[in-house]
Image (cartoon, coloured by chain):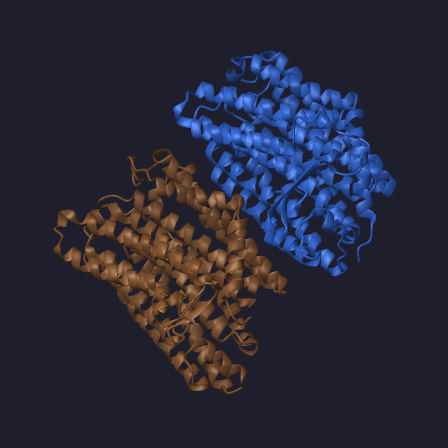
Amino acid sequence: MEYTSLSLVIWLPVVFGVSLLILGKHVAAGTIRVLALVGAMLGLFVALPLWVNFDNLQPGFQFAEYHPWIDAFSINYHLGIDGISLLLILLNCVTTLIVVIAGWEVIRDRVPQYFASFLILSGIMNGVFCALDVALFYVFFEATLIPMFIIVGVWGGPNRVYAAVKFFLYTLAGSLLTLVAIIYLYQVSGGSFSLAQFYETPIRYDAQVLIFLAFFAAFAVKIPMWPVHTWLPDAHVEAPTGGSVVLAAVMLKLGGYGFIRLALPIVPDAARELAPWIIALSLIAVVYIGFVALVQKDMKKLIAYSSISHMGFVTLGIFIFNVQGMQGAIIQMISHGFISGALFLCVGILYDRLHSRQIADYGGVVNRMPIFASFFLLFAMANSGLPGTSGFVGEFLVIMGAAEVNIWFAVAAATTLILGASYTLWMYKRVVFGEVGNDKVAKLSDVNARETLLLIGLAAAVLWMGVYPKPFTDVLTQAVITSLDWASQTKI
Amino acid sequence: MVSFYSQFQLILPEIFLLTAVSAILVIDLFLPAAKRMATYWLTQGALLVTAVLVFLVTSTSAGSVVVFDGLVVIDELSGLLKILICILLSVGISYSRDYLAHRDIFKGEYFSLALFAALGMLVMVSANHLLTLYLGLELLSLSLYALVAFNRDSKDSSEAAIKYFVLGAIASGMLLYGMSMIYGSTGQLNIEQIVNAISAGNADMDLLRFGLVFVVVGVGFKLGAVPFHMWVPDVYQGAPTSVTLIIGSAPKLAAFAFVVRLLFETLGAATLQLDWSPMLAILAAASLILGNLVAIAQTNLKRMLAYSTISHMGFLVLGFMTGTQQGVSAALFYVVTYALMVVAGFGLMLLLSKRGFESDRLEDFRGLSRTHPWFAFLFLLIMFSMAGIPPMVGFWAKLFILQSIIEQGFVGLALLAVVFSLIGAFYYLRVIKLMYFDEPSASTVAEQRTGSLVMSVNGLLLLALGLAPSWLYSLCEEVIKSSVRLF
């Protein structure tokens, strides 16, 4: 009953994107938007059967596809998904749809290129999550840089060039070190780029450490972890709303996925030995960046720092090496995708009206935009980790997992419940509650049908994951157990 | 054994080309200025017929054939390179048409010189004897010196030509001096006989090593590797863009053959390889460092691409340095895809230039995505390909080279290459930033109806080859395996 395939999931959005570029000038902007919407919807549509037909109990990779690609180096077009990839692909497809709808009215300039960039980016990111050949993974991983660079640089804010170049070079730096590691692994594994082969290749401990550091360079920048996180606030502030949503919701997850899929199973000894350092960096991200978020004046920068803080939970969950931690990390990735995406969307809605992201320029928005305020409150609460919303599930699992390793890790991590609530709710209070702040706020109009649709969709996702996360955790169980098995072996 | 008369069959392409260029020279004398296009078409015809002849000769001859008393070798490597040289030159000349006309240098002599350069390259690629190699090299170089100076009214061109000539003469002199030492040491000039003399122990190894150093100097100059790179920025910038295109593309393929024949086949015996391998490592590392760093400071696109050429040659030399078949195959793939990128890049500049407007400054590209969206997109592909970002073919070229050096254990050099590629990515990004993130300014190339099917194919080929590099790499590997002797 499989009328879909992973190749379709990857290439359908790319093909739609390219055709938008080709049709570009010859077709009216309205038609371009409709085509983009059709492309995004089809992209989600072909991904849904993956969920429906996914076998929760099967340990290996499903929906596998294998074609030889570059014979001379045994690089193959090898695709396959497990529970982790599945959830991330679905997150990606949903996010793409949201972004297309979100950019409907605001983008007036170079419309076909805008939608094409997002569709192509979406397809490439699906490729990252499906790739079972490490060279293929790397090609997709790097290829995401180009559309994102264009998105930030063309449709971004006043300082967009600095942000785009910083993003590109920072990410490229880590990736290039990983490239050297991947080529070294090719030698050591006897001439193959297959992920399964890498999982089984024995590697000496000192080489493992270097390879782990190379992987760490790439994925830590992507997540981003403290201290290589400085590109994210700039990128988020300068990116257009859609760009921020995709960046926060999906692109950051490439880093977490990379740790789970590549770093842990390939160099498990080094990963276990260096885990305390990673945990330390994660906790710094959670606590210190939480404080940094508290003092931000720009809403988008605040949410960017909040992203870094929440992603700290992801790396914490991964490197405590137990089932709850890993599950919590992945749930946190998905949940953070929805919540951050929703928060950036809300800020975008305000920005569309007032053209300012400064908290000081707002105040008493609830008086004019009550519906918006309700949705914004839900997402703010979810960001704080309120039980009943998806934000709680991931954090709770990770804290529980951390408690099994060391109670102080759990305590430090649990401070997010205080800090997260502080910065988010304080921002919310200053922007939304109280008397109408100034004349511009007085003239605000509430959300229209398109915006409400988006907010309802995201709210439903956040509440569903918060109230009934079982479908998500069921899908993950097998994948998490397999990953941890690989991560607990010795390869020296 | 090849009979006397059928030997000539094997060098039919070169004979044809020589006849064609002589004929074109004479015919052009009698053409009025208005009919100059005839020379252009004759030139294109000559190049394409030569390519076809090379194909026929290579496909009918079995394996490597050495003819004319060991002066000439016909093998798959020479066949592939000759075809590519002719095609790239033909494409480059097609881009130059309007450019030459606008600058009043659309003269018959231009095409004749270009064809002589092609002939020189064909001779170089098929050389089995040190003198044939030198002959081809000089024919190529002298034609290029004249081409660089072709625009008499340009002071920059004249200055560039003098620099190129003087430095080139010194380098040729060094090369000849090295060759003379090889002769002095082994008593032979024929490649196979030199190898025999070395392996029989009849050669004076110290003298040979001394000669090797001078040969490497000559090689370094031709490639444009540090510290023999001084001519590259000035010549690339000063020469008319159409000549820069010629210098930057096809001669690199000929230089590849030059290095393979000289360093790998002649002096590739195991002991000597240990001597030139470290030399090449230093050339490579220095080129990577200097090329990438200095390119950042440039405001002229041609000069920036010149420094980027130096860094690309660094990568190429890394492939040679390994001394393995893997490394040379990767180097061949690199030089072929690099030549394609260069033709595309300079070709785009040619198509964008107009009467009185050079379009070689970075400023001219500001906001190009508004005025020329398709060309801007093609240039984006070219820039990302040069930077080595997937999915363009430049990524694979770099990957294969890195693989070949890591295989031999040169992880440190691989890291150096990668770090400087990162630094180098900046100036490619800057061009894209100018094209896409900025609005057009007064100096931007104004909107005009220029289109070129060949340019589009050229640019899109970089993406297509990036998505399907396998056949080209397998071709390179097979050519090296069957052609390069004495591994």
Give how far across and how far down residue A116 sits, in percent.
50, 30
Q: Can residue A297 be seen in this view?
A: no
Q: Quadrant of the C terminus of chain B?
A: bottom right
Instruction: In the rendered view, tell whether residue A89 sits above or below residue B6.
Output: above
Give how far across and how far down residue B16 sits, in percent.
29, 60
In depth, the one of B299 and A172 nearer the eye is A172
User: Which residue is painted at 24% across and 52% down in the image?
Assistant: B42
Instruction: In the rendered view, tell whether residue A446 sits above or below residue A110.
Output: above
Q: Is residue A229 shown left or right of residue B188?
A: right
In depth, the one of A54 and B116 nearer the eye is B116
Instruction: In the rendered view, tell whether residue B302 sits above or below residue B136.
Output: above
User: Which residue is painted at 45% across and 50% down in the image?
Assistant: B427
Chain A hue?
Answer: blue
Give how far across and how far down residue B420 sits, in percent.
52, 57
User: Which residue is painted at 78% across and 21% down in the image?
Assistant: A467
Q: Quadrant of the N terminus of chain B?
A: bottom left
Kindly indicate which chain is depicted in brown in the rendered structure. B
Give how far across and how far down residue B230 sits, in percent.
37, 65
Figure label count: 0
